[in-house]
Amino acid sequence: MERILITGGAGFIGSHLAERLVAAGYAVRVVDAFVPQVHGEGGCSVREPRGAWLERAGAEVMVGDVRSPEVLRRALRDVQGVVHLAAAVGVGQSMYRIADYAAVNMQGTAALLQALLPAQRVAGKGGRRGREPGVRVRRLVVASSMSVYGEGAGHCPACGPVTVAARKREQLEHGDWEPKCPHCGVATEPAPTREDKAADPRSIYAISKLAQEQMVRCFGQAYGVPAVALRFFNVYGPGQALGNPYTGVAALFSARLRAGEPVPIFEDGRQQRDFINVRDAARACHLALQSGISGTFNIASGEPVTIAALAEELAATVGRPLRKDRGGAFRIGDVRHCLADTAAAAGQLGFRAEVPRRQGLGELAEWLERQPEVRPVQTAREELRAFGLGG
């Protein structure tokens, strides 16, 4: 039986992946620090404390920080594959908790790769060569993010495909939301973004995710380990942290709708995103483990939707009236549009999203009805304004 380690495995994507891999016949070990912001005070998630549901499903659960060499030594024992999901998540928060994000995301990844070295190192005397004791990891998968692109691919009606620059504060303060063509200044239109687009990270979180994928790919190339970076777009679905003010927009909107509170719509709500169900995200990880190839892939549905339209869909699905928070607010570092080109994932991993958004939102609504009501908090917006990052 092949043993897979999932770092951050009690989190949103990780818990779905762990259950999937156990059902597929893998031995699954989960290591998670159970950070209160994600799992609640005392490490309790919206499901059960300390990953008890995963243990019942057949996974081995370890409580620990991936930056700890001792935790990693125990976690990597007899492991053949690693899915590295442990990370601090939140674009806005990363801009004022810089050291925390760098430590968890970049130092955590470095510690993991350092811990893998003994099993990769070649030893021997007098010309005889062999591997040092330890199980050689055969596959590495790391969770990256669409945020590494910055603004997605753009198309100018006059000039054709263009690379879109970051929008300046002055532009946002005037409510001029659309990115401009660098050649003629005309507003551009969004286009599907391929993996070969030059990275342009515009937050500390995005920088850390790009560093994570580059470190893992570099390690894989140096030591002959197939390594895959999955650039997740907006993942949503049952199990997302409802009380975390830095969680995904679908969970945030759902929690506010359920509480009868206004839904915060930044800018004019016409910014476009690509949402993918968490079950599809977990399946992508599984396919990456099975593939034996190396590469970087967009993991998305390929079906963009505006934020305003998503709010309308969620309100209809949850069965609550939609009240919108004031429009025109903005956040420094936000991109206007990011749509995914999914051809590479389909062609090389065999991955195509299978859960339609309408069905996925319905599953999210059904799950919400079974959860204790969590009152949303305003922490994120207030802190962004306090640091001059919101308007």
Image (spheres, rainbow, N blue to C red):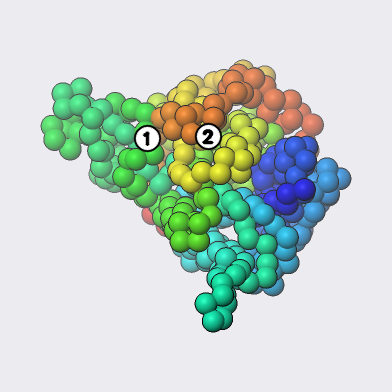
In this rendering, the answer to whether 52 lies above or below 162 is below
Displayed quadrant of residue 14: top right
Identify the residue at image location x=56%, y=44%: 292
In this rendering, the answer to whether 70 lies above or below 249 is below
Residue holding disc 2: 349
Give how far across and how far down residue 46 sits, in percent.
75, 43
Amino acid residing under circle 2:
Leu
Q: Is residue 164 left or right of residue 243?
A: left
Q: Nearer the viewer, residue 256 or 284?
A: 284
Q: Would residue 303 be seen by someone viewing this image from the given angle? A: yes
Identify the residue at image location x=69%, y=34%: 238
Q: Nearer the viewer, residue 379 or 316?
A: 316
Amino acid residing under circle 1:
Arg
Q: Is residue 204 left or right of residue 246?
A: left
Q: Nearer the viewer, residue 180 or 360?
A: 360
Q: Is residue 134 left or right of residue 53?
A: left
Give how far across and how far down residue 255 sits, in percent.
65, 35
Q: Earlier in the sequence, mark 2 or mark 1?
A: 1
Displayed quadrant of residue 95: bottom left
Callout 1 environment at 10 Å: few (<14), some (14 to 19), or many (20+)?
some
Dot label at residue 122: none
Q: Would residue 96 be seen by someone viewing this image from the given angle? A: no
Q: Secondary structure at mark 1?
A: loop
Instruction: Tell which tag, 2 or 1, sits nearer the viewer.
Output: 2
Identify the residue at image location x=61%, y=50%: 83
Give how far across and how far down residue 134 sits, in percent.
68, 67
Identify the residue at image location x=70%, y=39%: 16
Q: Is residue 386 left or right of residue 20?
A: left
Residue holding disc 1: 194
Q: Secondary structure at mark 2?
A: helix
